[in-house]
Structure formats: structure tokens, C-alpha cells
Image (tube, rainbow, N blue to C red):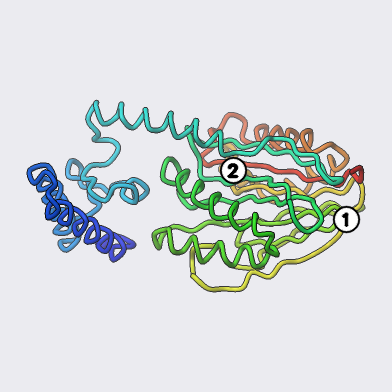
Amino acid sequence: MAIIGGDSFRDGLLERRRKVQQAIDLGGDAARFGHLLTDIDTALARLESEMFGICEACDEPIEIERLAGNPLLRTCLDHLTADERRALEDDLELAARIQGRLLPERRLAVSGWEANYQYVPAGAVGGDYCDLVPAVQNGGGFYFLLGDVAGKGLSASLLMASLRAIVRTLVEAGLPVSTLVERANRLFCETALPQHYATLVCGKASATGEIEICNAGHPPPLLARGAEVSRLGATGLPIGMFSSGDYPARKFTLGPGETLLLYTDGLSESRGPSGEEYGVDRLVATLSKRRDLAPGDLVAACLEDAAAFRTGVARADDLTVLAIRRSGQN
């Protein structure tokens, strides 16, 4: 069975082989590097025989996220040695600490806005992306971002870190939201494997109360204005799918007490004991009843309702909720 993205794995292995051979030619340790060349050639041979990505111990597929990080792997997680398991646990602990430092402060109050979020990975690390970045150009305010990288665990967290670095660099340039997402898409395509993509909501809240927002294939943010709660559907495809594409943004203005709620599908697609999906309708009902709450209390209420719906069923995905409210007080 051919593995998805096999050509990319082949190109990557050939590039690794070229660099290892170059190191040998420049006087590197021929014995040690020669062993690595053998491992690369074995992986290339397994690609040709369509055995690449198949565990040698059980003939089951090796986790694609692990292969993305190390294409020389030959066993799945279930068949790691004791030393390999300890090394993986150490890596996960370190990754969790690093990811914690990449997240913004949970509460933001700036330019007449309040924001608060909760980030709950399914494991030690997660692939959800959340950021709040004060704008230093174009009249203040702040950028807000919520995304979900395809996959779970360590590889997803690494892609999340890569996406964060891309977006943070573009935010510093003070780009319009639509241009920011278009460029982030191109750069993400250049750094990720073909099977990797991310849904993303990117927006800017200005000191005037205006919000400019783009939804790249993400679950619809909910806008509570007056007595209504509306859904802001996607304006473009998830980033990383195609290197070119339009990501138009929509604009609207919020008044004091009006709220924008963002979330990942770890909330909307969570399931209860009967297998029923939580769904966006239930989240709309929660927001309708709790629209007057401050962002932190609203986020807590959403998480409490989701936990009550699951009634003990373990979460299967990362979960993030972000609430943004116009306070009107600068």
C-alpha cells in the first residue's frame, strides 16, 4: 500500500542522503555516517516496495505524524523498546513545557476590548493554535488567532509552533488580515508535508470597535450582537492545502457588551455517551443564555456545558475556546 505523501518522503530521504554523503566526503566519520546511509537506503527501498511506513513487528501502519518527524522509523508506538519509550516520554514532557511558553497570557484587556481563552490539549501537547497579539501599528487594538493543525500529539504541536512563528512575523508587518492569511498559507505550504494543513480564524480588533476577520476552513465563530447570535462561515479553504488562494475578510463593528466566540472542533465535535455530537447549535444556545458574562466566565460556562454533555466520556481531541468582548472602556 502506497503511503500518502510518498513523493515528499522520497525527496526528503534523498536530500538527507545527499547531505550525509557530503559530510563523509568532507572528512566525516565514515563508519558512523555510513551506518546512517544504510538506514536511509533501507527506507528508500521500503518506499519502492510499498513497505515504507509499515511496522516490522506487527505489519500495521506507523503513525504518520511520527514518520513526518523521522522517516527512518520502522516500528509503531506499540512496539517501541523500553529505552525508546523513556526517550519519547522525555520529549513529550519537554514539548509540553515549550508549548506552554508559546501560549499568550490567558486574559487580554486593550483598546476597549477584553479577551480570555482556555486551551486544553487531549494529551501532553496539542495541535490547537491560539494567540493574542497587541497591534503596534495602525491605531492599536490586537490580532486574535485560533486554529487547528491536522493531527495530534508531538508532530501537531511542532506544526503549531511553526504556524505561530509564521503568523507572528507577518503580524509584526502590520498587514491587512486577508493578506496576512494569504501569505501564511503560502509559507505553511512550503514548510509542511502535503498531508498537513490547518484551519484558522485570523482577525483584528481595532480601537474603534471594528473587527476584521478571515475564516480559513475553521468551525464558524459565533457573533452575539443584540438579541441575535450569528455564525461566521468560512471565507477560504484551510491553509496548507494549496499554495495559492484568496482569503477575503469580512468587517463589522461591535458595541459595548457584544461578544465574539471562537472554538475548535474539539468542542463542537465532542461526543456524549450515546455517540451524539455536541454540535454548534448547542453552543449557540449556551452563548444566547450567557451572552452577558465576561469573557473568562463565558469560556468557563462553555466548557462546563460541554463536560456535562459528555458525562464522563473522555475527550478525543484538543479543545480551545476564546471569547472576545467589546467593553468600550479604553
Question: Residue 87: x and y, percent?
Answer: 31, 29
Residue found 33% across the figure and 45% down from its top: 66
Question: Residue 251: x and y, percent?
Answer: 80, 64
- Crowd around label 1: few <14 · some 14–19 · many ≥20 (10 Å): some
| SS at circle 1 | loop
Amino acid of disc 1? Thr
> Residue 28 bears which disc, if any?
none
Q: Quadrant of the N terminus?
A: bottom left
Residue 118: quarter of image: top right
Residue 103: quarter of image: top right
Tell whether 214 sits left or right of 164: right
N-term-proximal mark, 1 vs 2: 1
Tell whether 32 sits left or right of 8: left
Tell whether 65 sits left or right of 178: left
Residue found 65% across the figure and 33% down from its top: 307
> Most extreme residue toward the left, as rendered?
31
Question: Residue 281: x and y, percent?
Answer: 73, 51
Residue 176 in the image: above or below residue 151? below
Amino acid of disc 2? Ser
| SS at circle 2 | loop
Residue found 49% across the figure and 70% down from its top: 243
Tell whether 330 sits left or right of 145: right
Residue 185: quarter of image: bottom right
Return the residue nearer the eye: 204 or 8.
204
C-alpha span from label 1 to label 2: 36 Å
Residue found 22% across the figure and 30% down from its top: 81
- The total number of labels drawn is 2
> Residue 208 bears which disc, if any?
1
Q: Which residue is mark 2?
A: 270
Q: Quadrant of the C terminus?
A: top right
